[in-house]
Image (tube, helix red, strand yellow):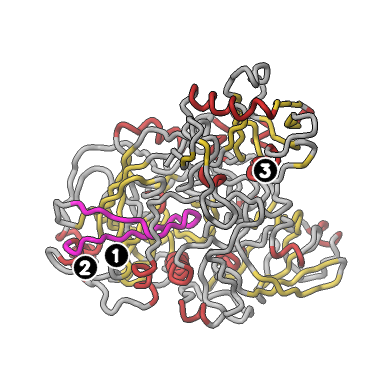
Amino acid sequence: MRLIMALARASSLGAGRAQQIAPVSNALAASVLHPNGRMAVRPMSMLGAWSQLHAHAQASSSDRIRGHQQHSSTMCSRPMGSVLCFSTSAGSMDRQESAGSSAPAPGGQWTAAAAAAHPSAPAVEGQAPPLGAAARVYSSHIVGDHEVLRQLEQPPAQCASGPEILDSIVKVFTVHSRPNHFLPWQNHPKRESTGTGFVVAPRLILTNAHCVSDATYVTVKRHGSGTRYRADVQAVGHDCDLALLSVADDEFWATPTPIAPLALGGLPALQQGVVVVGYPTGGDNTSVTSGVVSRVEVAQYVHSASHLMACQIDAAINPGNSGGPALQGDEVVGVAFQNLPNAENIGYIIPTPVVRHFLDEVARYGQYRGYCSLGVLCQNLENTHLRRALGMGPGMTGVLVNNVQLTSTAAKAIRKGDVLLGFNGVPIANDGTVHLRQRERIYFSYLITLLPTGVPARIKLLRGGVVHEEDIRVTPNDALVPVHTYDRLPTYFIYAGLVFVPLSQPYLMEYGEDWPNTCPRRLYDKAMHALMQKPGQQVVVLSQVLVDDVNTGYQALQNLQVVRVNGTAVLNLRHLQQLVAQPQADGFVRFELEDDRLVAVDASMAQDASTRIAQRYRVPALASLDLTMSQDGNQAPATDVSGSASSEGNQ
């Protein structure tokens, strides 16, 4: 209570203009129907009105309607009854390694020193993508300055305490411009938002990823100051909804008083009080609210539709609170990031084990690699007869493996039909949960997601009535259809007016608020159910036809998967680009689409037609920047609308 009163006295709580909720990200929630038997532990879908959670960055009034459209949530169409253990590899998670014998300590952290003790963990930074795989091209606003990020390698020498805590909490102002996936060489109109951040290390500010996703300009303002300072995004983990900012101006850090980082605490216990500090809607000054921890569980992160540990609290969390600290005493126990609309004071914070993992990954690799997963689809085994049919003896518990992603590291050890009995010595219950602490339980994906990338783990399986133990290495796994593509320029390739793109959920979301019902059904089914079979695999789609003499008659063919080019199965968009450069002996390039549709283009006319079409439709380049890069990372010449060498124009 002393802290609440001190913060309240230091804050000027305003009752200013009311602002509409307009979350920043364009990700919708995925289904997390854990209690009902089917728990999704992979960012399966941007859908999911399991909770209709909303991320909380305030948006400007000019973007209110669009913000609502992007964030309305609906139920995921996955059938009830399975556990999905997948992830997107944009980044990994943290836990204290315990030789694989017990569940991690809730507040344990994986430090850079501990990481050094695991030389077997692969340093994936700088590795080239699989041959033909589309490169991940991130926006230039993510700086990744190793000198700045080196501050994470050592704990702060001194942390803020008492009323000076407010000096470490800043307001974040962001201008966003997200890509238009229907016209991937263009962006949507810019929009503005505000959020909260706090100093977590010398010259580094922690905030939510959705506060700075697809950002074009970021500024921050200190408590009690009227001056905004330019900020750089140093690292982003979209799956855990965290980002690091830095400010180059020394005046920001020193005036009127030096800023000290906030200390990170442990995982809060149930019914413990928390204080949430931020800059929410309703005023321009700092706001302080209080509440208690209601539950700790694996929950859905709206920004990326991932499923990670989260704490539910009853403190008021409103738009603009995103990125603000949840405090117990002088320590941060979580980061505010979303709430449950149409409910009374139900908010969510990212707990410190997730925060620590993000920071440790960035300290180790210079960027966030993604949270680990097994890449398996599982089913709960709460039915007695099903357990007996699988040969499970009395007292034996686990989950049934329904499917395995062939590109996952676990595919060598786990087979379809296995029963997963335990992970790293921790038994898995029939409902998929494991022991957390005292009488609390949490879904077993928690054990996997909090492991550093590439470390060994041991799984216990029942196969054919015989118990096996296998050693694996856990890594992030790519989804065949990406759930989100924040901070990436869309990939596209235009050949003779035929526009080809890889399928992604942001592409389908361009169909509007009700995109699950209005987007092409076959593409939706692929996005929801298809699994990656080969490294670098993509679902390549003929998005549209820019009509010209060379392609007239094909304009009705759109949103169809490209199956083969010149008789060769298409792996991904880069592979398609290579195939069209090799016409058949008769001079034609043949595209075989789903439904046995066929498109033939005269290769001798394609180049001139492509240049003419680009000029007519004002397309700056015939291929996205990642496709114009050679395999060694150097930029190859790209043909612009005049036929000369140029670079990609949709920065």
Residue matched to label 2: 259
Q: Where residue 286 sits in the image (x, y, percent)?
A: 21, 53
Q: Where residue 406 sits in the image (x, y, percent)?
A: 74, 57
For mark 1, give the secondary structure.
strand
Residue matched to label 3: 578
Indicate left or right for 426 with 308 as reference. Answer: right
Mark 2–mark 3 CB contact (< 8 Å): no
Instruction: Classify residue 179 by image quadrant.
Output: top left
Instruction: Classify residue 278 by image quadrant.
Output: bottom left
Residue matched to label 1: 199
Please tell me which residue lies in front, 83 or 408: 408
Q: Where residue 417 sits in the image (x, y, percent)?
A: 81, 59
Q: Earlier in the sequence, mark 3 or mark 1?
A: 1
Q: Amino acid at mark 2?
A: Ile
Q: Is residue 60 magenta?
A: no
Q: CA distance from mark 1 to mark 2?
A: 8 Å
Please tell me which residue lies in front, 555 or 262: 555
Characterize the local packing of mark 2: few (<14), some (14-19) or many (20 or more) Cα atoms within 10 angstroms: many
Give the residues in magenta: 228-251
